[in-house]
Image (cartoon, rainbow, N blue to C red):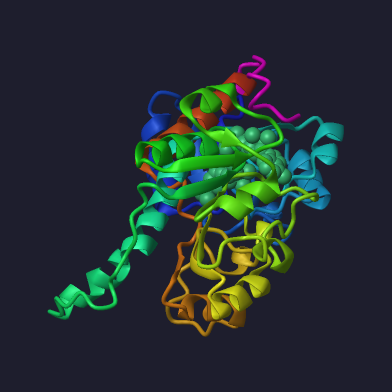
Amino acid sequence: MEANKILFFSAKPYDKAFFTQHNAAYGFELDFLETHLGPHIVNAVDEGTFAVCVFVNDKLTAEVIEVLADKGVKVIALRCAGFNNVHLETAKRLGIRVCRVPAYSPEAVAEHAVAMLLTLNRKTHKAYNRVREQNFALTGLLGFNLHGKTVGVIGTGKIGRAFCKIMLGFGCKVVAYDLFEDSELSNLGVQYSTFEEVLKQADILSLHCPLTPDNKYLICQETLNLMKPGVTIINTSRGGLIHTSNTIEALKTGQIGYLGIDVYEQEDKLFFKDLSGMIIEDDTIQRLMSFPNVLVTGHQAFFTEEALSQIAETTLHNVQQLNKGEEPDPAVILI
Ligand code: NAI
């Protein structure tokens, strides 16, 4: 019988729900494992598995991919956009195809960045707790208008573009830096400038560029010194864009007025897990979370029904095409 099974790693209840629902139209055999894929578990992959479906923290090293090839696995289906965790050369050498989901609701991430901003500038996280204690006093909840403020956007690709449009709708002045300017955004009123100029002008700065070897610690002591005192920084992109200990120092001096982060450089040890009964050994995240003007969310910006539907649909479609011997769109196929 032809292999028809997709084996999922790092599977959460929501993965199971969305993939099961969308699979009604595809008819694959789905099997879900909670553990991440790595050398410790790869031998458990049974023969007859056509594809493994993996997420950001699964480790597809050369060693792991060699075992997958021995077991007859034909496809590595990433249910995310990034692929830095897959040893592509080994997959290529062994004839395993690798596909991904290049875009899944950029609006989901842009809207979460805005949600973080609105939480911080209107202190709704504090108000929520206060009224539950029947404390209806306003002292300490003073916010500021977004209307009329200058918003700096670093990276105006799919997510940054959606974010710019929302901020223009709020009546903000939007200044942006990208390696490539988007003429549609310029026509809408976004003003492109140099990176330094954007930092100098911004009351609020939001990061929407990918993490590359060239832009690690884009936000560090040196660049923080260029910014307006009391600047608000939002990062829904990648933790490594921000030098966390420099940021903590800037929060202590008031150079940063508010910080909202959905991503954190050491997040793979923390995020996507319930650690509520554990002792967290990472003192940096504990220090960050102790500031009243810092909001941390656990890489949830993408996490909407629309995005999960898109991820399930695109992944199953990719696997189906490869299963039928059809060539998927170049945007989704990596090898
Ligand atoms: P995209 O590829 O559509 O846009 C990225 C933009 O950044 C491009 O216009 C590119 O020219 C620009 N860019 C690259 N290097 C730059 C630099 N050094 N300075 C300024 N601009 C630069 O990517 P998309 O879909 O907008 O995603 C952006 C980032 O958002 C992803 O790389 C990822 O890190 C993050 N992300 C976060 C998610 C979350 O749940 N928190 C979910 C999905 C993506």
Residue 270, position in %: x, y?
Answer: 55, 69
**Screen quadrant of the C terminus:** top right
232, above or below 71, in the image: below
Residue 133 can be seen in this image: yes
Among all residues in the image, which is located at the extreme top? 326
**Screen quadrant of the N terminus:** top right
Question: Left or right of 178: which side holds 124?
Answer: left
Quadrant field for ligand 1: top right
| Quarter of the figure with residue 126 | bottom left
Identify the residue at horizontal 43%, vertical 50% (top origin): 149
Identify the residue at horizontal 45%, vertical 54% (top origin): 300
Residue 138, position in %: x, y?
Answer: 20, 74
- 79 vs 164, nearest the viewer: 164
- 282 vs 325, nearest the viewer: 282
The magenta stretch spans residue 325 = yes
Taken as a whole, is the magenta stretch helix, strand or loop?
Answer: loop
The magenta stretch spans residue 201 = no
Identify the residue at horizontal 74%, vertical 43% (top origin): 68
Identify the residue at horizontal 38%, vertical 28% (top origin): 24
Residue 32 can be seen in this image: no
Question: Left or right of 198: which side holds 22?
Answer: left
- 221 vs 49, nearest the viewer: 221
- 204 vs 4, nearest the viewer: 204
**Number of callouts in the render?**
0
188, above or below 71, in the image: above
| Quarter of the figure with residue 111 | top left
299, above or below 48, in the image: below
Question: Left or right of 126: which side holds 72?
Answer: right
The stretch of residues the image draws in magenta is 323-335
